[in-house]
Image (cartoon, rainbow, N blue to C red):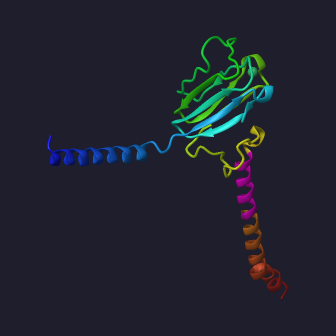
Amino acid sequence: MNRREFLRTGAGATAVAAAASASTAGTAAAAETTEVAVGPGGNLVFEPSKVYVKPGDTVKWVWESDNHNVQVLSTPEGAEWAGTEGPKTQTYNTGHEYEHTFETKGTYEYQCFPHAPSMAGQVVVNDSGEAPSGGANKEADPKHMGVPIQAHFVGIATILAIFVSLMFTFFLLKYGESPHASGGN
Ligand SMILES: [Cu+2]
């Protein structure tokens, strides 16, 4: 291979690599890994207990105390997730790491079998990888999850009510007295 051929090949390879990385960036936008501490400080919790990720993102559980596992309770339809290896009584100790890449959107529920039901967590896979209402609150209380829709409904109902009463007032002022007034004549 002479120098010119080498340069041409090099340029070609660079172009191919650039194209490949460009198309990779276009299709799989920055897959991320979210860490969940397992039993931090000896507390029987997953921290954070609820995480939001995008399809293709990975959640990595890192054991910070002993005798815990990740037992899957439910997955979205069509999704497969087995949790930590072995039977549900199989536990792992400090330093253990377990990770899973989530592809299917929806809510995944899991618990630590020996410390259930209090030691439990959720993985929510959605397009944004953020909590639904603004994203700031990653620890949204599940009891409040239905509120945004109701809040929208109340807001729309309030606007409608104001509009209707304004229209009522308008027509009352414009036409309201005329039947009585003319009838009185
Ligand atoms: Cu546990």
Q: Quadrant of ligand 1?
A: top right
* Left or right: where 11 falls relative to 49: left
Q: In which quarter of the image is the N terminus?
A: top left
Residue sitting at x 73%, y 64%: 159
Q: Residue at x 54, y 24 (%)?
A: 80
Q: How many labels does the image show?
A: 0
- Please state if 163 lies on the left or on the right of 19 as rendered: right
Q: In this view, does 131 lie to the left or right of 158?
A: left
Q: Which residue is drawn at 19% across and 48% down?
A: 8
Q: Is residue 8 left or right of residue 146?
A: left
Residue 114, how many percent across, how many down?
Answer: 76, 16
Q: Magenta segment, which residues?
A: 147-159
Image quadrant containing the C terminus: bottom right
For the stretch drawn in magenta, the main secondary structure is: helix
| Residue located at (50% from left, 44% from top) | 30
Query: Which residue ends up furthest to the bottom in the rendered image?
Result: 185
Q: Residue 102 or 23: which is nearer the viewer?
A: 23
- Percent x, y for residue 69? 68, 19
- Residue 177 location (% of width, % of height): 81, 81
For the residue pair 25 and 51, the one nearer the viewer reads as 25
